[in-house]
Image (tube, grey):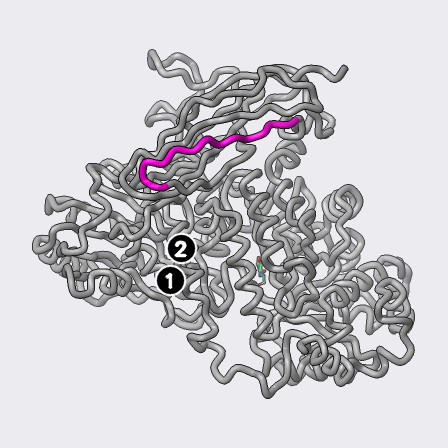
Amino acid sequence: MKCLRQFALAALFVSPALLAAAPSIDDRSAFIADLLGRMTLEEKVGQLRLISIGGDMPRERIVEEMAAGRIGATFNSVVRPDNRPMQEAALRSRLGIPVFFAYDIIHGHRTTFPIGLGLASSWDIEAIENSARIAALEASADGLDMTFAPTVDISRDPRWGRTSEGFGEDPYLVSRIAAAMVRGFQGKDPSDPQRIMASVKHFALYGAVEGGRDYNVVDMSPLRMYQDYLPPYRAAIDAGAGGVMVALNAVNGVPASANKWLLDDLLRRQWGFKGVVLSDHGAITELLRHGVAADGREAARLAISAGVGMSMADTLYDQELPALVRSGAVAQSVLDEAVTHVLNTKYDLGLFHDPFRRIGRAEDDPADVNAESRLHRADARAMARDSLVLLENRGDTLPLRKNATVALIGPLADSQVDMLGSWSAVGVAEQAVTLRQGMEAALAGQGKLLHAVGANVTDDARVIDYLNQLNWDRPEVVPDKRTPQAMLDEAVALAAQADVIVAAVGEARGMSHESSSRTRLDLPDSQQALLRALKATGKPLVLVLMNGRPLALGWEKDNADAILETWYSGIEGGHAIADVLFGEHNPSGKLPISFPRSVGQIPTYYNHLRLGRPYTPGTPGNYTSQYFEEATGPLYPFGYGLSYSDFQLSAPKLSAERMHPDQRIRVSVTLKNAGPRPGATVVQLYLHDEAASVIRPEKELKAFRRVKLEAGEARELSFEIDESMLRFFDASLQHVSEPGAFRVQLGLDSQAVQEARFELLPRP
Ligand code: NOJ
């Protein structure tokens, strides 16, 4: 029935110009080649324009340009009644080539899921895939075709605000998530009207900007690139991502948007990427500011020659490409290849078969795009619960009793917009459940909730100004007019009446966003003062952290009775956090990124290369690698997270101590839930290569399993190690394994591991 309807729609809407002359629409390459052959130079250049809606060009002008066949796609137009007239205009153009509609759907569309770091903290690959599937379902129902996601930039520097958007520091975990997100968005086939196409970003190495300062340069050895930073992009592409967005940074002296090695040699030739390459916002013009192009003509030539296909919110392609091609400075074949990728993308999205396959018919448009019935709250709550990471729980402070009097204090306790986190697509703040609302619902009819703000997120006027100018549609950080002391006094007086204090502190969402790089990683002063005053009451102090990056939490670790890292947990965050605080749900999240002790200690990633003089505790001044003013190692390591259960893992047993390259070794462990309640945890498998031709990391995550166990239940788990898991990039960038000894380490975090040794034998 559905198919018939689509067929009818297609017959109605596909431009006769397209259908008449073309060879069979079922033969993609013949169909696209024929179309390309009929296009003028201007029409071809038009296909490379990706226009921002709400940018400089008024909507009427956009429609005119579309009707003239001079626009290939848009982004930021997100409802069917807005997209429909644009598609109709495109179909009126001489060749009737449809446009596609893209948007930044990063962690949910109408239903806001936890931010990337939160999703990653679940280590639940199926649930993460499901969150992307739901985002695709909602976005496609709004007439969208493509998302600029997943963001898979490895981040080892939490000063970088976009750390929040990605999935952490580890190449293996981020790669697994990258592939899952692509599967979730695209399903089996991006032409599915309930799916959208994924455009993985930011290619490449964006997370390694120097000093964590956004848009800064990246200079990196090829070994590190291949070993650590490139795998997640590759995983997304291998999973079928239809698009790649180019990073704004330079890669070893050449901006990514002009980097032929990156976009052509590596992406197209070595990796065989067949999809569309998009520039980031204005990046072609930025080639002038990078100083690799003397003028716009040069910038456009460099970008298209390197392999940038569509230009996002940039005018240089339309201004310069026609003359560049006419003069032969850019070969016709280079332009044709770029246009072919765009047309293929539209084909793969199913738009040539039915340009309205996601926009649908006007009579089916939702009366209210924000209707509750369009949300997927249950999935959001389940995902959010599993994204929470319990960092401390002294004396079993948590879970709280439901008949307790709880003082909920802090600037983030009742802030709807901050529940969403940045890049929250069309998520509506008013639909987000705050912690206050979640706790009130959980306590209903039993205990008592007292609430005070206690402190502003920050009292620094400069920071407030910055945060309010980040292009949100309204000021988001509106300080309380009272004096800091008056707010503190109120909070302390309230705390004195309570059994326990829950302090909701952290960062306003704008602090963990594009361009929001920080020099400090501690809580803003206003919130530190609040916590110290609350601590002085002597009441048990539970911190609920909301933030988009690892924070330096030395004082908090020493002084809080419990700490729950909640990131920005999305539309159902308040319920999810309350579920964990009151023990309805046993926390199981694990950190996807290390928490440093201080800014000076960055980077603190766990999988660093081995040293000739690693830090060895003992006599001071023993000339080993350390910062002498503070303890060595992270405050909380990668993979760490507590549970209300007591999970015990046995020492690993190997099925053999030697393996030929074509054999496997089975590693077995027993996991026991020795606690009184059911729960889940993540068993993590790391490998350590004892000696190789290049320096290998201390350890590398190679497998993991999220396991749910009933109270008292024990289960034997086994992992297989094969030769491919022992491979690495050698000095000539070959992906090889080398015979020799390895250690396999199993644990519930990256530090507390038990190990066994085995040997990889040479090939006969
Ligand atoms: C700039 C950001 O870097 C990129 O991630 C995003 O997709 C585009 N703007 C479009 O919004």
Identify the magenta region. Answer: 710-722
Query: Which residue is drawn at the image coordinates 64% and 49% (left, top)?
Result: 236
Which quarter of the rendered image does ligand 1 occupy? bottom right
Query: Which residue is drawn at the image coordinates 60% and 39% (left, top)?
Result: 229
Which is more N-terminal, label 1 or label 2? 2
The image quadrant of residue 112 is bottom left
**x and y, in percent, of residue 607 in the image:** 51, 30
Q: Is residue 263 above or below residue 758?
A: below
Decide: marks 2, 1 in contact (CB < 8 A)? yes
- Quadrant where the C terminus sits is top right
Judge by depth and name the residue closer to the eye, 711 or 141.
Answer: 711
Give the side of residue 526 with respect to residue 718, left or right: left
Indicate the amino acid at tag 2: Ala
Query: Residue 384 bears which disc, if any?
Result: 2
**x and y, in percent, of residue 464 in the image:** 35, 61
Give the side of residue 735 with respect to residue 706, left or right: right
Give the side of residue 702 with respect to residue 393, left or right: right
Does residue 719 belong to the magenta stretch?
yes
Q: CA distance from mark 2 to mark 1?
A: 7 Å
Secondary structure of the residue carrying tag 2 is helix
**x and y, in percent, of residue 401 in the image:** 18, 51
Query: Which residue is drawn at the image coordinates 54% and 69% (left, top)?
Result: 138
Asked if disc 1 is less than 8 Å from ligand 1, the answer is no
Does residue 451 belong to the magenta stretch?
no
Indicate the amino acid at tag 1: Glu
Residue wearing tag 1: 572
**x and y, in percent, of residue 476 in the image:** 36, 66
Judge by depth and name the residue closer to the eye, 323 or 9.
Answer: 9
Q: Is residue 720 above or below residue 570?
A: above
Q: Circle 1: is it few (<14), some (14-19), or many (20+) Cα within 10 Å?
A: many
- Quadrant where the N terminus sits is bottom right
